[in-house]
């Protein structure tokens, strides 16, 4: 390998490190399609070895976090020169048009890191044609075949969730007759390639994140149920104590009735006094419209605010409204886009069910792209989870 080639590989390695932006990804459960190109050096029975071009396509599947299996196939132009001609009839220059293919196993050493080193080995075959210096096929133009054993190592630099820059160095073992000169040792060629791997499907890390969210939802629900049971037990014990004190029980009932009546009157008063005003070109945030955790199901308390929105729409029948859903930044961007859209659809369905024409309503889901508060606090995330009315005309 020439110094120029070495400097080129070093430059590409440094460029890949600079391009890398910290997208740590797992390979388990994902298909990867790789397109790589570079150079080869044919190691055979000729006295002078020359560099030739080559390209390779790879398809593999991540069986475990550290093990992948698949296939490689490509095209190599292998070249050699003989300074002193050997036996009569031997060519001074030899070139192969070769097509290698092999079943291959990869071992990944840092499957969840930004930079993932790996080694690989496989077994397959190579078909080829021999040409001399005049680009004339030697013997005939029929393809010949050889056993192929690919070995090598490389680095993947993840540049996004679905792509990685690759540097690959390897050696391909063939039989001894590929160069048409049999000396009792195996021939082969070294390769140096760069390219990209493109990952298909959802990464295992995203699936693990969803599983974590589901587990957290179950944990919160179980804690809430346990807290409700404890609260009920305390309430039952208190009720029993109050039943033993007739006077105290009567007073408690009287105070509770007064408090409930006062609360009802205040709520009715707020419902009458609070009015949603819709103006062309303006945006209204429907504070109080909430949903069940990680779902698009409206809570019971949301109906008070939706009733006000219904009155506003009935009062301005000429207006059209864009209903937009927003979320906080917990979870992936794609998941939150879908969730915010489904929540906006739930609000639209409620309004249509209560008499508003669907032609007046359109919906959109923004996910966490347009926050109005800081997503690092509980209060900020609560403010970012919202429904907005954008009055169009």
Image: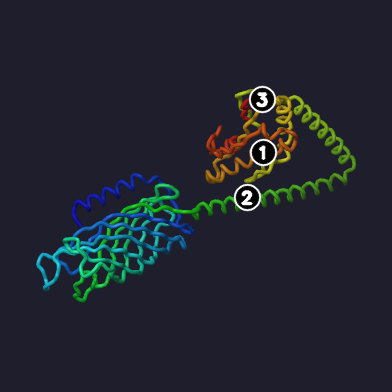
Question: So how many labels did they put on this image?
Answer: 3
* Colouring mode (rainbow / by chain / secondary structure / one colour): rainbow
Q: Which residue is mark 2?
A: 217
Q: Quadrant of residue 65?
A: bottom left
- SS type, badge 2: helix
In the shown orientation, is residue 224 left or right of residue 99? right
Mark 3, residues whose alpha carbon is within 10 Å: few (<14), some, or many (≥20)? many
Q: Answer yes or no: do the residues labelled 3 and 2 have beta carbons within 8 Å?
A: no
Q: Residue at x 31, y 69 (%)?
A: 148
Tell me how far mark 2 sits from mark 1, CA to CA. Answer: 17 Å
Disc with the residue nearer the chain's start (2 vs 1): 2
- SS type, badge 3: loop
Tell me the quadrant of the picture where the N terminus can be found: bottom left
Q: Answer yes or no: do the residues labelled 2 and 1 have beta carbons within 8 Å?
A: no
Q: Position of residue 251 (x, y in %)?
A: 87, 37
Disc with the residue nearer the chain's start (1 vs 3): 3
Tell me how far mark 3 sits from mark 2, CA to CA. Answer: 36 Å
State which mark lies toward you, 3 or 2. Answer: 3
Q: Residue at x 24, y 50 (%)?
A: 8
In the shown orientation, is residue 240 left or right of residue 348? right
Q: Which residue is mark 3?
A: 278
State which mark lies toward you, 2 or 1. Answer: 1
Q: Position of residue 2 (x, y in %)?
A: 18, 55
Q: Which residue is mark 1?
A: 290
In the shown orientation, is residue 292 left or right of residue 139? right
Disc with the residue nearer the chain's start (3 vs 2): 2
Q: Position of residue 360 (x, y in %)?
A: 67, 31
Q: Quadrant of residue 277?
A: top right
Q: In terms of depth relative to the viewer, which is nearer, 14 or 377? A: 14
> As drawn, which residue projects farthest toward the bottom?
184
């Amino acid at each position: 390998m020439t110094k120029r080639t070495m400097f080129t590989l070093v430059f590409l390695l440094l460029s890949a490190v600079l391009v890398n932006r910290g997208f740590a990804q797992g390979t388990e459960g994902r298909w990867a399609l790789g397109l790589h190109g570079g150079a080869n050096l044919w190691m055979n029975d000729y006295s002078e070895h020359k560099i030739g071009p080559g390209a390779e396509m790879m398809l593999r599947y991540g069986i475990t976090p550290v093990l992948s299996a698949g296939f490689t196939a490509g095209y190599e132009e292998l070249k050699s020169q003989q300074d002193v001609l050997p036996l009569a009839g031997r060519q001074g220059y030899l070139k192969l048009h070769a097509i290698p293919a092999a079943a291959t196993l990869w071992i990944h050493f840092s499957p969840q890191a930004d930079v993932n080193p790996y080694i690989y080995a496989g077994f397959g075959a190579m078909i080829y044609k021999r040409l001399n210096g005049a680009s004339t096929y030697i013997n005939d133009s029929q393809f010949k075949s050889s056993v192929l054993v690919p070995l090598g190592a490389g680095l993947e630099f993840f540049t996004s969730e679905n792509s990685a820059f690759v540097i690959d160095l390897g050696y391909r073992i063939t039989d001894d007759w590929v160069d048409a000169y049999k000396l009792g040792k195996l021939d082969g060629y070294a390769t140096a390639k760069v390219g990209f791997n493109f990952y298909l499907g959802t990464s295992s890390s995203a699936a693990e994140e969803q599983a974590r969210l589901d587990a957290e939802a179950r944990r919160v629900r179980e804690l809430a149920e346990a807290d409700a049971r404890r609260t009920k037990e305390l309430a039952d014990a208190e009720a029993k104590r109050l039943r033993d004190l007739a006077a105290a029980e009567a007073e408690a009932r009287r105070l509770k009735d007064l408090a409930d009546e006062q609360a009802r009157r205040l709520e009715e008063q707020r419902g009458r006094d609070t009015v949603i005003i819709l103006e062309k070109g303006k945006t209204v945030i429907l504070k109080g419209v909430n949903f069940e955790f990680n779902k698009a199901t409206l809570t019971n308390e949301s109906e008070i605010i939706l009733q006000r929105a219904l009155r506003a729409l009935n009062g301005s029948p000429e207006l059209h409204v864009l209903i937009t859903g927003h979320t906080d930044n917990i979870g992936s961007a794609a998941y939150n886009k879908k969730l915010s859209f489904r929540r906006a659809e739930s609000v639209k369905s409620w309004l249509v069910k209560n008499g508003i024409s669907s032609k007046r309503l359109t919906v959109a889901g923004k996910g966490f792209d347009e926050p109005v508060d800081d997503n690092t606090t509980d209060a900020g995330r609560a403010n970012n989870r919202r429904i907005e009315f954008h009055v169009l005309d």
